[in-house]
């Protein structure tokens, strides 16, 4: 408050206080003089000068209490009465405001939209009474009016210095009340307009059938048979909420401007001005995004249904790749891929329309490169697909041919009747070889696809692996298989020779049950040599090959020595005992 205004208010209050005191003092003096004269006239002469007479009491009270004190007492009594009356009036007004607010729901709706209901709901949850919003507003009205009553009482009592700070506060509040009322009116009008516009937008979209059309597009690609726990909000409701909050933001900016809070209103006004300039571009971008989204869902539905009708799912299952699509089908996966591609294109177009070049430029360049790479990528995918399908067919042919040619019987003679794998089709040797042929054909297709995509480094890695597998690994496996075959042949030949050439001996023959340790040792010796040659064929260092051969051959010799020594321990003890007894008998006879 300016200084000259405060001085004027103080002067007026002092003038009113002096006039009031002069009036009360004059009245008190007049009453005192009249009463004194009446007492003096009515008092008997004999008691005029006596003790405890009325004159004596009047003189004594006048000597103790001055006229100013009496006037101040009357002022305080009247001020107290004024305070009580004002307090009762304020209580009545606040109660009336509370009852009026209880009869309407507009304040609750506005508070709920602005988020103020969270504070009052917390107060109600802590047990501080029901209807916390109405009670809070009534309490604010009560304290504002009580401040006015206190200022009036202090001013009436002549306590200008005590009333000056409160008067300044009340003046500030009174000057701010029109601004607050204007801001509240703007908020209320904005709320009403926002509700009306949101209802109009929601009703128009529902009448146009946007929600039903979007639900129809989303229906065929759904993989769940049960409805979700929290269904997504409809498009019409979401659009209505966007319109509502946009209008509320505009109303909030107007309210802050009306309250003259420039620290917040200026940045918000600038933001809204920029937003209003961008609204046409944002609207066009929103239309592009909406159209792209609808087209993406339509493309997904068309691709999914087309692939399902063409038997794409059965084809993928026959090639053995059905396990890759867990939780969905290959046709739905292709539909989602097409939808993602369309959405990326839509996002690039929308960002470019809004003017976000920082985001749209890299995405545009990426999509341009993708379009250039798309023919090569499609060709590479076709190569890999043909490789998988051809590998599947070739695997079936090779497995059947090897089984019919007796490859499994030959491997059973060597000692590989079954292969310990999880998949049943690869349990036989012919199935395992057929699977290796399929993998080789798929790798050849992958090499061609990598060369087609100009990924020469990765292609060279796969080429090197294939060369190693053909020239080194396959030969090493062949040497190992030959070693097993030769070892078994040597074991069988020595077993026949140890039985004296009788190959027709029955299994119950005593010689059949004798341990053929020489035959088994010969078989293991052949296997050691074959394993050493296979390791050398893999290109391992010669020192490691020699070390491997030495360890295997030494272990074989040590095992033979231990087996011979431990197995012939009882026989050797018996021979030694017989010779010892024979020697003792000869010594006794001589």
Image (cartoon, helix red, strand yellow):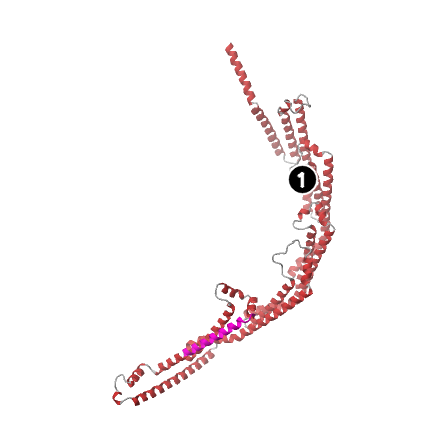
Q: Which segment is the magenta one?
A: 79-105
Residue 324 x, y percent position in the rendering? 66, 47
The residue to which callout 1 is attached is: 424
What residue do we see at 33% from left, 87% from top?
35
- For the question of whether residue 289 can be seen, the reply is no
Residue 201 x, y percent position in the rendering? 65, 67
- Residue in front for this viewpoint, 160 or 506: 506
- Whether residue 41 sits left or right of residue 200 in the image: it is left
Decide: is 394 above or below 302: above
Residue 422 x, y percent position in the rendering? 64, 40
In magenta stretch: residue 81: yes
Please identify the residue farthest to the top as the structure is shown: 590
Decide: is 62 above or below 412: below
Name the chief secondary structure element in magenta: helix
- Whether residue 558 sits left or right of residue 209 in the image: it is left
- Disc 1 is placed on an element classified as helix
Residue 139 x, y percent position in the rendering? 48, 71
- Residue in front for this viewpoint, 507 or 294: 507
Which of the 4 quarters of the picture holds residue 353? bottom right
- How many neighbours does mark 1 have within 10 angstroms: few (below 14), some (14-19), or many (20 or more)? few
């Amino acid at each position: 408050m300016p200084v000259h205004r405060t001085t004027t208010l103080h002067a007026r209050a002092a003038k009113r206080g002096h006039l009031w005191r002069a009036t009360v003092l004059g009245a008190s003096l007049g009453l005192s003089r009249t009463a004194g004269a009446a007492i003096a006239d009515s008092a008997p002469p004999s008691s005029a000068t006596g003790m405890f007479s009325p004159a004596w009491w009047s003189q004594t009270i006048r000597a103790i209490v001055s006229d100013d004190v009496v006037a101040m007492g009357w002022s305080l009594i009247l001020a107290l009465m004024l305070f009580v009356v004002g307090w009762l009036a304020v209580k009545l007004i606040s109660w009336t405001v509370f009852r009026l607010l209880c009869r309407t729901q507009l304040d609750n709706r506005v508070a709920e939209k602005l988020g103020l209901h969270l504070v009052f709901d917390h107060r109600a949850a802590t047990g501080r009474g029901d209807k916390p919003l109405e009670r809070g507003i009534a309490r604010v009205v009560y304290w504002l009016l009580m401040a006015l009553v206190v200022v009036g009482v202090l001013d009436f009592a002549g306590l200008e210095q005590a009333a000056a700070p409160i008067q300044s506060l009340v003046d500030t509040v009174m000057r701010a009340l029109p601004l607050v009322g204007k801001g509240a009116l703007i908020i209320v009008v904005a709320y009403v307009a926002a509700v009306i516009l949101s209802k109009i937008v929601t009703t128009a979209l529902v009448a146009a059938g946007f929600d039903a059309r979007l639900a129809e597009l989303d229906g065929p690609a759904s993989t769940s048979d049960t409805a979700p726990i929290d269904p997504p909000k409809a498009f019409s409701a979401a659009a209505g909420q966007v319109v509502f909050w946009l209008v509320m933001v505009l109303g909030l900016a107007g309210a802050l401007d009306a309250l003259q809070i420039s620290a917040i209103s200026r940045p918000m006004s600038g933001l809204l001005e920029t937003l209003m300039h961008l609204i046409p571009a944002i609207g066009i971008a929103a239309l592009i995004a909406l159209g792209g989204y609808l087209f993406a869902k339509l493309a997904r539905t068309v691709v999914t249904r087309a692939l399902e009708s063409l038997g794409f799912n059965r084809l993928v299952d026959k090639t053995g790749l059905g396990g890759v699509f867990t939780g969905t089908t290959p046709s739905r996966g292709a539909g989602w891929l097409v939808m993602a591609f369309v959405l990326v294109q839509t996002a690039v177009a929308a960002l470019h329309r809004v003017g976000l070049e920082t985001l749209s430029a890299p995405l545009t360049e990426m999509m341009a490169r993708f379009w250039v790479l798309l023919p090569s990528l499609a060709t590479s995918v076709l190569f890999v697909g043909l490789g998988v399908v051809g590998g599947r067919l070739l695997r079936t042919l090779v497995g059947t041919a090897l089984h019919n040619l007796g490859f499994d019987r030959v491997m059973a003679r060597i000692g590989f009747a079954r292969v310990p794998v999880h998949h049943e089709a690869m349990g036989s040797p012919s199935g395992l070889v057929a699977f290796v042929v399929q993998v080789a054909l798929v790798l050849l297709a992958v090499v061609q696809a990598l060369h087609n995509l100009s990924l020469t480094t990765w292609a060279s890695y796969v080429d090197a692996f294939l060369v190693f597998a053909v020239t080194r690994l396959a030969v090493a496996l062949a040497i190992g298989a030959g070693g097993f075959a030769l070892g078994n042949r040597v074991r069988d030949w020595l077993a026949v020779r140890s039985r004296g050439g009788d190959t027709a001996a029955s299994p119950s023959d005593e010689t059949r049950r004798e341990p053929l340790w020489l035959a088994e040792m010969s078989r293991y010796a052949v296997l050691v040599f074959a394993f050493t040659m296979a390791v050398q064929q893999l290109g391992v260092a010669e020192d490691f090959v020699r070390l491997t051969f030495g360890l295997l051959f030494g272990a074989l010799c040590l095992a033979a020595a231990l087996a011979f020594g431990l197995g012939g321990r009882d026989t050797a003890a018996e021979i030694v005992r017989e010779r010892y007894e024979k020697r003792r008998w000869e010594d006794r006879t001589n």
